[in-house]
Amino acid sequence: MKIWHIIRGINDGGAETLVKDYATLIGDDFKTKVVMLYCVRSSSNWKTLVENKIDCDIIYKKWNLFTKIFNYLFGSIFVAYHIKKLIKQDKPDVIHCHMPVLKYISKLGNNLNNIKLFYTCHSVPERYFSGRHKSEYTSAKKMLRQHHLQMIALHSDMAKELNTLFNIDNTIIIHNGINIKRFMDEKTTREDIRLQLGIPKDAFVIGHIGRFEKIKNHRLIFEVFESALHKIENCYLLLIGHGTLLKYFSMLSKDAKYNNHIIILSHRSDVPVLLKAMDVFIFPSIKEGLGIVMIEAQIAGLRCVASDAIPRDAIISDKVQVIKLTANIDMWSDALLMGGAAEKNICTIDDYNIQKEIQKLECLYRGD
């Protein structure tokens, strides 16, 4: 069975990581292709796809200002034409869409006949189906009506939102699975990784993993760290991620008030190792589809302090403290340094076992 995953781009984000996992871990009965508008070739997800010899098609070989403008003006026609040609050549049995790509797929018309169509929502539905993505909503409605598009949500609240938004009742939940074995088998010690990163072994390390984008709220992280540094002199901040705001925050981290205690890393595939260097995980997103890295942090045994924008399904342990986004900075830093009342979990680690979730996906593709 031929499976296509169509996604806007491949970098090191959560949706991209999930597509990488789907492509590399699915059973041998399935032949996978990943179709993308662009890719960040330095990303660990792209390197993993290449290492595993996954068939990939990149529509824009370069992703720069010119191609971005071209795609904005003519992308709906150009991308649809490119995908239409690929369908005629490859004849996929399943097309699984991720992120805002439905506006391209909806223009394929009869070319979608006899192809099973799936769409996974990776963020809060209002983010993907309103504002500048209003055309995604129109395209989704069309494909639900004409091509029996199957909606997939990452958690129960998202499923309810999608059902309400599109007046349907059949959204399926497939959790953003994690390869739990990676966290159990990691042999690198806390002392070794801190030594590699130049962090004192007795330091108190606040950590975060996430794209350097406004929605991830790095501005708050920096303010909270400054407060924490006034309370504990030997406090460090470890940030892992890439994104459009990386250069800005890299420059900001060099401010003398942070005492050279901020370390920023990009394009890392060794998340289980890096989590070992941390004492506490901060996750203050303004909006979040699920928050898979916070689930990984809990699997690694870390205490987490998260914003009230995080879905409840991301709480899988008794190690998560939720703070309102509107809370003052001292409340955030006190929670990180001293802890507080933890939230009750409604999901468990087993709910996010990647092998179980991929088995569900295989059943969907086969129509079981």
Image (cartoon, rainbow, N blue to C red):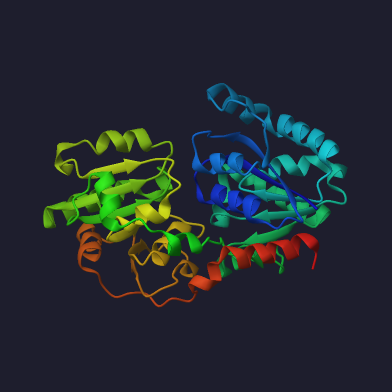
Residue at x 15% of width, y 41% of height? 257
**Front-most of residues 258 and 357:** 357
Give residue 51's position: percent from left, percent from top.
59, 41
Residue at x 22% of width, y 50% of height? 236
**Front-most of residues 65 and 204:** 204
Q: Is residue 360 left or right of residue 255?
A: right
Residue at x 79% of width, y 68% of height? 368
Q: Quadrant of residue 358?
A: bottom right
The residue sitting at the front extreme is 187
Total labels: the figure holds 0
Q: Is residue 31 left or right of residue 330?
A: right
Q: Quadrant of residue 287?
A: bottom left
**Residue 216 visible, this orientation:** yes
**Front-most of residues 69 and 185:** 185
Give residue 144's position: percent from left, percent from top.
76, 56
Give residue 141's position: percent from left, percent from top.
73, 53
Q: Is residue 22 above or below residue 344?
A: above
Q: Quadrant of residue 85?
A: top right
Q: Is residue 89 left or right of residue 43?
A: right
Q: Is residue 333 left or right of residue 118?
A: left
